[in-house]
Amino acid sequence: MSTRSRGSAAELEVQKWYEGRGWRVHRAYASVVQTKGRAFSRSHDVFGLFDLVAKKPGEPTLWVQVTIGPRLAEKLKTLRAAGDLWNICDTCLIWCRTDTKDARWKVYEFVAPTGEAVETDRILRGGVHAMIEPPLPPVGSTTAEGGHA
């Protein structure tokens, strides 16, 4: 299976996870562009950043980036570069596919004012949701003693 196919399958899995919990989800799809007899696939991420946008009455808008493999730092860099785009009604999430023995997905919330990511959830095999409380320290943060968390 190609990386693109695995990525699309991962996006669909996350989309179905939200829809199964009552969210309405818009998914960005790639399109094919033909130039001089050659076909190219072009991404249509929302704002060039997000794979999914999810809405539910009474909840903040979820802006979701789905990634397979260890690409959290790359995704954070892209979100930071977007600047002051976020408001209080937005929640920016990064779903990282881990497929470890303790979690299939790790979910991070992007904290816009600081540009850090806080692990908030783990989705276990079978779709079981394990919320992390209190949230773990932001990725790359330091403890009060000056060491890394």
Image (spheres, rainbow, N blue to C red):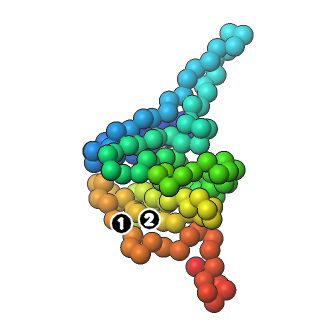
Q: Are marks 2 and 1 in contact (CB under 8 Å)?
A: yes
Q: Which mark is residue 120?
A: 2
Location of mark 1 (residue): 131
Residue type at the position of mark 1: Met
Q: Secondary structure at mark 1?
A: strand
Which percent across, then down, holds residue 102? Answer: 39, 66
Q: Is residue 108 visible?
A: yes
Give the total number of marks visible in the rendering: 2
Q: Nearer the viewer, residue 148 or 134?
A: 134
Left or right of 14, for residue 38: right
The residue under the point 45% across, 58% down is: 107
Q: Nearer the viewer, residue 89 or 114?
A: 89
Residue 1: where, in percent of width, then height?
Answer: 49, 37
Q: SS at mark 2?
A: strand
Depth check, front residue: 127 or 52: 52
Tell me the quarter of the image containing the C terminus: bottom right
- Can you tell which mark lies on residue 80? none
